[in-house]
Image (spheres, rainbow, N blue to C red):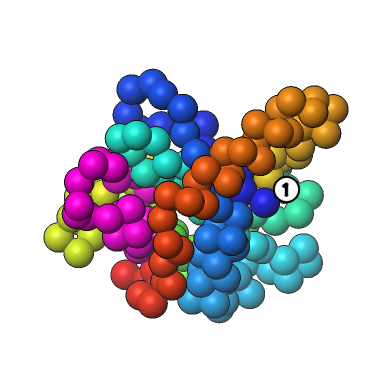
Amino acid sequence: MSEKVDERRKSTGGRSSELPSDYLRMTEEVFTSNFSDALEKCGKSPPSQFSAGGDIYSDEVIVRMSLLQDKKLAGISVYASSDFDPKASAPTIETLLSLCVDALGQVFQGVFDWAEKEGQFSQLLEANLVDLDDLPLVWTPIEVEKRKTFVRVDKANPVLDQAADDWLAKNDPELKKQSQKEEQDAAGLFVLPTHKASPKK
């Protein structure tokens, strides 16, 4: 299920469309495959897992990937944002999404490298983000394939937030209809990328 990313990089207003759940599921699978060793080191009981979310605005694309464990309130959520111009022929939204996914992979690679160096895999979700080397706690530009992409990290657990939203949706038919329409609108905006490139650095 897609999870809305509430905190934007840009301060412009406007409505957004959530990234389709199929795309987000595919992105989660790519991260799970590429970082399988790190997930195993984080612990199997309960297992660590990735959870993706994202939104398309009229001037921004934002993708989020979170590392979570059941029964733990905190997670590690990494956000990637790119400027978007729907009227431009290039870069396409598919390209921007691919760049964001690669940026997320770069940040998570840094997180796991730190955990390996410090022997902190089992306590990674409890770690103070300030202790992690060079972690972007505010929107920070990085270069991915010669294009500027912005990244940021926090301790959010969007699955818990989504659970509250789901409860509201089940008890508010109009909200449920609106969420379904937004996902359908987003699905028609682009052809899903295939994630040929690894999100690793």
Residue on which disc 1 sits: 72
Amino acid marked by disc 1: Lys
Q: Could you tell me which residue is drawn at 33 percent across and 22 percent down?
A: 12
Q: Could you tell me which residue is drawn at 30 percent across and 35 percent down?
A: 59
Q: Quadrant location of residue 195?
A: bottom left
Which of these two is toward me, 194 or 28? 194
Q: What percent of the width, then of the height, locates residue 116?
A: 47, 69
Q: What percent of the width, then of the height, locates residue 136?
A: 34, 44
Residue at far left of view: 146
Magenta highlight range:
80-106
Q: Quadrant location of residue 45?
A: bottom right
Instruction: Say whether residue 94 is magenta.
Output: yes
Is residue 52 among what the camera can see? no
Which of these two is toward me, 33 or 93? 93
Q: Secondary structure at mark 1?
A: loop
The C terminus is located in which quarter? bottom left
Instruction: Say whether residue 175 is magenta.
Output: no
For residue 137, side relative to residue 67 (left or right): left
Which of these two is toward me, 3 or 161? 3
Q: Could you tell me which residue is drawn at 58 percent across and 46 percent down?
A: 184
Q: Could you tell me which residue is drawn at 23 percent across and 60 percent down?
A: 144
Which of these two is toward me, 200 or 91? 91
Q: What percent of the width, then of the height, locates residue 130?
A: 42, 42
Q: What percent of the width, then of the height, locates residue 125?
A: 60, 52
